[in-house]
Image (spheres, rainbow, N blue to C red):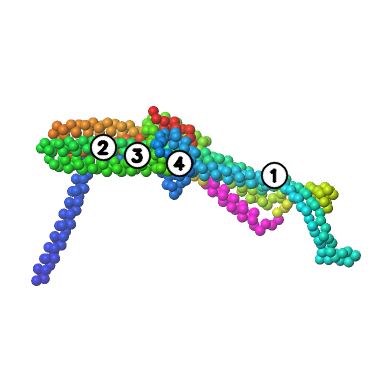
């Protein structure tokens, strides 16, 4: 009995292992067939272009301050128009202009400590004094004097003659203002980069819509042909079903492409400040023009000389050096003068001019460690600015090198993609002719359609990548605003 139960358990385990093995074999077979079918279609995954996006929650360059109201007409929008609107309405640029204004105000604040400070005052006084409370008693002096009155009109002036602490702070504020001006120029380059990228993305999305529409028309024609041939008894029903599935697939892709295109148009409107609800159409197409660039070393040299963010970081480093020197100068003596001049008397008509002039040499002796604390903070700021400048220098080197590599690779991809589109179109024509002649079924036509779709997607993506590489190279070298219009000019 025990042997019988053991044999039954062994048989059960054997059956389970066999079932599991069979399932694994079927899964592998299904995967192999799928891979084999994909390889026969010749469809390759389109290269994924990495879009330079600006999430609204992370960058102000994705937003704008809108102007005007939406009109009922469709606005034609060229790349130059979009760039002009972006440089006028983009939020990142407007905020940077406010930062420039604040830096200019800070410079004037520091300068005011070095310039003469003049104030005026006119007073009419009535006073009664208790001499006894002041300790003046006896000698026939009255305890209470007054009330009596007098008039006083006076101008007061103070002037710092030499204060190294204030001088260095003013110099630091001057460098900060220069840095703010350069940051404003850099913000214009970033707006050019944002508008250029978004406009190019929208163009690419519009091209995908046109391609999807053409593919739907092709699939519709194939389906109609399959229906006619099935009714004539030439082809089986499976060809009709296959053509219908292909048609619906293309229709779904068209829906997705239109939705993506509409969303990108909304993003472009946000970047350049179009009124909400304003309809517009893009008038420029994605151009392709090979770009002859300078060598790597020349581009790097130009970048270090022209990049506004790098020049601004250098100015900020100099400002930090001045503020550290100002903190050190808090321990040094300072010299200043003060004075006043005015008329004083019982009435304005009986007043007489008086004045006072004083020179003061102020010598810091003990400030409770405040000067030392200011020096430590200024030293930390200076080290941080130097580290950021060194990092930015390496970042510029990286951006220039990668932009040149991307430009070269994208140009080669465009040429290959163009050839692939031509070959795929020829394959589709031959496949349709073979199907119409009854030599092959419509599976060959569907595979050719997939190849055409993939080739078109490759071409659109490579063209977008090539134009974006131009924009990124202009930004990396520091000539984005003057160069991008030339780079993206339609031919």
Q: In what quadrant of the picture does the N terminus appear?
A: bottom left
Q: Secondary structure at mark 1?
A: loop
Check disc 4 and report its element: helix, strand or loop. loop
Q: Earlier in the sequence, mark 3 or mark 4?
A: 4
Q: Nearer the viewer, mark 1 or mark 3?
A: 3
Between marks 3 and 4 in the image, the one whose residue lies nearer the viewer: 4
Which residue in the protein does label 2 denote?
215
**Residue 487: image x %, image y %?**
42, 32
Question: Which is in the foreground here, disc 1 or disc 2?
Answer: 2
Of pointers 2 and 4, the one earlier in the residue sequence: 4
Gap between marks 3 and 4 measured at Cα: 26 Å
Instruction: Give the labeled residue for mark 3.
Output: 205
| Magenta-drawn segment | 365-387
Q: Residue at x 64, y 48 (%)?
A: 326
Give the x, y percent position of residue 6.
12, 67
Mark 1 crowd level (few <14, some 14–19, many ≥20, 10 Å Cα): few
Mark 4 to mark 1 CA distance (whole Å)? 48 Å
Residue for point 13% across, 60% down: 15
Q: Tell whether position 380 is magenta.
A: yes
Of tags 4 and 1, which is closer to the observer? Answer: 4
Residue beneath label 1, please? 115
Q: Give whichever of discs 1 and 2 has the lower sequence position.
A: 1
Residue 401 seen in the figure? no
Front residue of 380/463: it is: 463
Q: Which mark is residue 69?
A: 4
Label 4 packing within 10 angstroms: few (<14), some (14-19), many (20+):
few
């Amino acid at each position: 009995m025990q042997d019988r139960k053991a044999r039954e358990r062994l048989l059960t385990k054997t059956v389970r292992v066999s079932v599991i093995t069979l399932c694994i074999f079927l899964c592998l077979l299904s995967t192999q067939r799928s891979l084999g079918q994909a390889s026969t279609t010749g469809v390759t995954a389109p290269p994924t272009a990495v879009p330079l996006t600006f999430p609204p929650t992370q960058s102000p360059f994705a937003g704008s301050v809108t102007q005007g109201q939406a009109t009922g007409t469709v606005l034609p929008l060229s790349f130059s128009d979009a760039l002009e609107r972006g440089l006028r309405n983009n939020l990142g640029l407007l905020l940077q202009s406010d930062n420039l204004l604040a830096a200019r105000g800070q410079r004037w604040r520091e300068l005011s400590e070095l310039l003469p400070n003049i104030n005026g005052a006119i007073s009419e006084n009535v006073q009664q004094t208790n001499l006894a409370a002041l300790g003046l008693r006896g000698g026939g002096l009255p305890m209470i004097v007054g009330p009596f009155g007098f008039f006083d009109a006076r101008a007061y002036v103070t002037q710092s003659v030499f204060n190294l602490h204030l001088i260095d702070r003013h110099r630091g504020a001057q460098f900060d203002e220069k840095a703010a001006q350069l940051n404003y120029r850099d913000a214009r380059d970033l707006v050019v980069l944002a508008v250029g990228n978004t406009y190019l993305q929208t163009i690419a999305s519009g091209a995908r819509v046109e391609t999807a529409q053409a593919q739907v028309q092709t699939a519709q024609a194939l389906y109609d042909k399959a229906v006619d041939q099935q009714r004539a008894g030439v082809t089986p029903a499976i060809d009709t079903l296959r053509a219908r599935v292909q048609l619906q697939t293309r229709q779904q892709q068209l829906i997705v492409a239109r939705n993506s295109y509409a969303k990108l148009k909304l993003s472009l409107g946000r970047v350049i400040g179009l009124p909400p609800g304003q309809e517009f159409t893009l008038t420029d197409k994605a151009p392709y023009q090979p770009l002859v660039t300078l060598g790597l070393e020349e581009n790097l040299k130009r970048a270090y000389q022209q990049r506004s963010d790098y020049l601004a970081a250098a100015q900020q480093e100099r400002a930090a050096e001045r503020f550290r020197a100002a903190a050190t100068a808090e321990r040094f003596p300072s010299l200043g003068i003060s004075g006043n001049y005015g008329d004083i008397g019982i009435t304005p008509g009986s007043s007489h001019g008086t004045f006072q002039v004083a020179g003061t040499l102020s010598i810091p002796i003990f400030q409770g460690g405040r000067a030392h604390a200011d020096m430590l903070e200024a030293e930390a700021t200076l080290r941080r600015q130097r580290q950021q400048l060194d990092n930015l220098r390496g970042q510029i080197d990286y951006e220039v090198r990668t932009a040149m590599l991307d430009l070269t690779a994208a140009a080669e991809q465009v040429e290959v993609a163009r050839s692939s589109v031509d070959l795929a179109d020829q394959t589709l024509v031959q496949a349709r002719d073979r199907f119409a002649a009854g030599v092959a079924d419509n599976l060959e036509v569907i595979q050719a359609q997939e190849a055409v779709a993939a080739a078109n997607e490759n071409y659109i993506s490579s063209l977008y990548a090539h134009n974006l590489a131009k924009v990124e190279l202009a930004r990396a070298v520091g000539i984005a605003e003057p160069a991008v219009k030339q780079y993206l000019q339609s031919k």
